[in-house]
Image: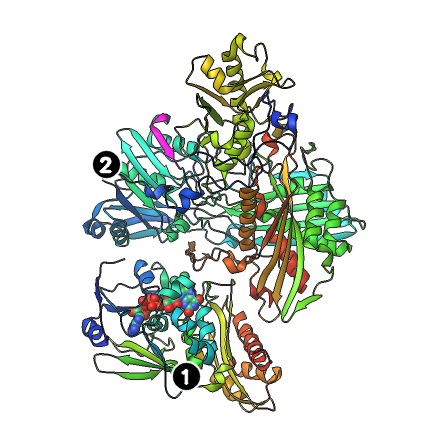
Amino acid sequence: MSAQSDAAAPQPALPGRWQPAVTQDPMLRKHGAQGYGSLGQPVSRIDGPLKVQGKARFAAEFPYEGLCYAALAFSTIARGRITALDTAAAEAAPGVVLVMTHRNAPRMKAPSLMMSSPTAAGASDLPVMQNDEIHWNGQPIAVVLAETQEQADHAASLVTADYAPLPAVTSFDEARKTPRQLDNLLGQPPVVEIGDAEAALKGAAVQVDQIYRTPRHNHNAIELHAATVAWTGEELRVHDASQLLDLTAGQLADIFGLEADKVRVSSPYVGGGFGGKCLWDHQILACAAAKLAGRPVRIMLSREGVFRVVGGRTLTEQRVALGASADGRLDALIHTGIVAMTSHNSCPEQFTFPARHLYAAKTIRLAQEVADMDMLANTFMRAPGESVGTFALECAIDELAEKLGLDPIELRRRIEPDKDPTSGKPFSARHLIDAYDKGAERFGWNHRSPTPRQRRGGEWLIGMGCATATYPYHRFPGGAARIRLTAGGQVTVSTAVHDMGMGTATAQAQHIAARLGVPLTQVTFEYGDTSLPRGVIAGGSTQTASIGGAVIAATEVFVEELLKLAGNDSPLAGLSLAEVETRDGGIGHCDDAARFESYESILRRSGRDELVCEAEAPPPAEMEAFSMHSYGAQFCEVRVSEVTGEVRVSRFLGSFDAGRILNAKTATSQFKGGIIMGIGLALTEETNFDPRTGRIVNASLAEYHVPVQMDVPAIEILYTDIPDPQAPMGARGIGEIGITGVGAAVANAVYNATGKRIRDLPITLDKLM
Amino acid sequence: MNPFTYERASDAPAAIGLAKGNAVARYLGGGTNLVDLMRETVERPEMLVDVTGLPDGIEPRADGGLLIGAAATNTALAADSHVRTHYPLLARAILAGASAQIRNMATVGGNILQRTRCRYFYDTAAACNKRQPGTGCDARDGFNRYHAILGASPACIATHPSDMCVALAALDATVHLDGPDGPRSIALADLHRLPGDRPDIETELKPGELITAVEIPPLPFARRSTYRKVRDRASYAFALVSVAAALDLDNDGTVRDLRLALGGVAHKPWRASAAEAALKGRPATPESFRAAAEAELAAATGLRDNAFKIELAKRTIVAVLGNLTGDDA
Ligand SMILES: Cc1cc2nc3c(=O)[nH]c(=O)nc-3n(C[C@H](O)[C@H](O)[C@H](O)COP(=O)(O)OP(=O)(O)OC[C@H]3O[C@@H](n4cnc5c(N)ncnc54)[C@H](O)[C@@H]3O)c2cc1C
Ligand code: SF4
């Protein structure tokens, strides 16, 4: 895929050795934020034209000779054993190739839980269709392969099962009676104590102590989960809808007992990921069924199937207690609570993460535990932890501000920490108050009345609220990048990463053009295939920085190779990496404009058609040395009907501090998308999990309410665009922060409009009547 | 979805002839409800008789009323200039329903006969007396936010989901039928049944009967009418409560006549006759609106998730009538 036309001629950039936490990315060290051609410009998506023409091929669109189509039958109990499974009618149905159940499925190793090893990708560690056990309501019990999708769907509806049910924990109220302690929370301690926070709370002049609840959510990306899979002997080819390419390949190899390099997974286009497009049972079952049938298989889950097979965000119950002095300093910050999880996964919705880094407090207590239920493994969903954690924390801050008689922004100014409040590390960069000030001015925050119920238009009460957004910076180790330069001056950078619509390919092409000093039109960014150098996952808003680290490393090798090739007859003779920069399609001395040779000239003189360099990113030492986070200030105006309790968000503004912005257009879309998802979290989204059966009742887009066009007002986005000195390109990652803080901004605005604090999401009209 | 045969009828006799005596034949309108239910294997017809080729005209009658062919699309009906001028509540009700794409496909006949959105009805793993008589009702102690507060039975608490029908009920519309035993007509308000102990029998239609047209009588004061739908998101959601109303006021502000119907509250579009009776001849004030609403909902009962709808229905009635009383109505 090649880049589109350049916005401006590229400015010089400087490659030099990057030592994370010690030196800055040379791009920043030399030039600061300015002067990188199209970097930061609103370049339109490179893959846009392909997508609108229908030429971008998604996972369920790859043709294969002899392809058959899969459909799943699901269990209807939450826990027990299958005592009888009647597949005869399905097998006899027209077009059916085979029916696979636990009786005839190939033997497979169980997946390993993601993060339990560098190659593990399992969302749960239950074996997949290897025995008669049922662990959740909706678990696949049979796979039907047929000549057409319709035949497969029909035959799957003919599969019947009898069960011997076992007692199942499908009620959260029941499960929470026996909470389980975690030994770690995504690698962090589950309990953090600084001083005696409960005692400090009791002694505080002003106190807030409340319980906040957030419900289950389900993934509803527009592209349904799908895979097209084909075996050639012991080699497995998988076209997946994935944000986890290399891990998926490694995990599938492990499950099927294959050499790692015998599994190739590709995923050039993904119609939305949000944490849901990882490895679930359907890809494993498709591979197993394809093996059994000796034919390629396509599986595309139905919308109901996504609810049955792909986990979602779990529910949380959180206590936030704040003790403050009369002048608005925090004596105590307590954030504790419990989430529903299972014994076969590890995804504890780390809602206490924001409170670890946001505010200065004399004493702190953070703790979370889990309640095990018999249900589908819950999973990551855009800003797992932070999205719901900021709801509770930021509502409580608003409640405290009111009790103190302070403007909520002023309160945040007073509790702004000068170093990370729990780790004690310095912040790499933090401009939260800046973001608040800019956002407040633009939004007209000074028009907000501190007293609720002061503004109305007819039956509609109008209110404003704000809340802090935050999301950590992460850079995953292990990613590599390859740079290929051809004699014609074309640059191709390759790494097995993902573009699920975020704009990765576009922003990275801009980055590479800037870093190598070539026009955007000469850059191709290759991604989405495990045959490329190992990439990182697209998760945790880490991909941009992780790719950056790998490209920096590859660039160092590239420049050193070119200096070697240039040899003694070049104006570059004798120069080292530290003395040169890339510019104008070649390499030049940093301080001497005359000493320059173009890439093309170096290749030509050395008789090379191309130069290929590959390197792995240096370990993320910056994360150890610094507290690195993105921040934002979310502003919301709502209208609430006094008659019906209906809530309409009438204005929204997000003001972010996320480091340097690489592409104004795709970044703005990411922020807006997060905010829209946050409006859903605040007002409409809720999975109806029936506690009697453990079954999801509203497994459909008609009844699971994501926001529709009319729920979404004009959204304005601001950003500081201040590079983070410790991050590659100065960019901290922007995929998830948009959703954080939105729930609280909306709830705080609802309070300002109505005088009612709604502490359990979603804020449906019955709660306001 | 189960296999089925597909036939296209050119006129009503042909449609009736194709379906006659075939217990597993169904008429097919836009398919936006029936095909969904077939996908879920809730409906398992063996034959579909496509009736979208039947008359779809929207014709004003000499008396000022309107005759609507059953195959008219929801979009066409909502856009019709006679409807927009003379029956604005009907246009608004239709536009409050579903999405533009669905309304483009959906027919008037199909909209009237669309089935409940109770999720337990859709999920063949659940107990549902409507889908499988005698199995029980999982909604009663389950998720029942969208369920009935009026006219429900121990066997079933489902609601009829149509918006259009609420307006038609308020307008005293008549449904014209044709079938193996010949043509007949029935008031829309009498077409749908309350669930009683047979929630599987939803209407008074006899086997093989076809809706051919809907007729709306003239109602001059319906120019002052509206439809308000209260729901869980701003669009593309079924009603929690909806109110269709037309108001005729004397010069002195007394209610001379009115039409009032509720949606989202019962197994059928709910004509609010008690409220109408309570309000006729009374002053058009918030107090008398409230009293009328109280009268209509006196018999309402709430369950775990839907009890709030009783108060919501009352408030929405008062607000809608209040709006119609104002000069901007
Ligand atoms: C996601 C979604 C959201 C929706 N939201 C709303 C909403 O907010 N409000 C609302 O009111 N509706 C809503 N609907 C429902 C929609 O209005 C109905 O699906 C539509 O009106 C049905 O019309 P149809 O022509 O497609 O009927 P079909 O699906 O073709 O048929 C429905 C039934 O009517 C029968 N039938 C059709 N025509 C005739 C005839 N002439 N004579 C006898 N029987 C006939 C069929 O046999 C079938 O039983 C929604 C639907 C969907 C899928
Ligand atoms: S309410 Fe009616 S439709 Fe719903 S489960 Fe009960 S019987 Fe079935």
Q: Amino acid at mark 2?
A: Gly
Q: Residue lying at the far front in this picture: please name it.
A: A594
The relative height of residue B193 versus residue A269 in the rendered view (above or below) is below
Residue situated in front as seen by the camera: A670 or B55: B55
A109 left or right of A562? left
Q: Position of residue A171 (x, y in %)?
A: 48, 54
For residue A528, above or below residue A656: above
Which quadrant of the view contains residue A98? top left
Q: Provide residue A564's location: percent of width, then percent of height.
A: 51, 12
User: In the rendered view of the protein, which quadrant contains the N terminus of chain A?
Assistant: top left
Q: Quadrant of residue A570?
A: top right
Residue labelled with disc 2: A294
At a point 57% along the width and 75% down the height, the residue shown is B315
Density class for disc 2 (Cα within 10 Å; few <14, some 14-19, many ≥20) is some
Rendered location of residue A208, percent (x, y) = 71, 53
In-front residue for pair A627/B90: B90
Query: Does residue A296 appear left or right of residue A585 in this picture?
Result: left
Q: Give the vertical position of B288 relative to A452 (above or below).
A: below
Which quarter shows the C terminus of chain A? bottom right
Q: What are the residue bounds of the magenta stretch?
A: A261-267
Which residue is under mark 1? B172
Q: Are marks 1 and 2 on the same chain?
A: no
- Chain hosting mark 1: B
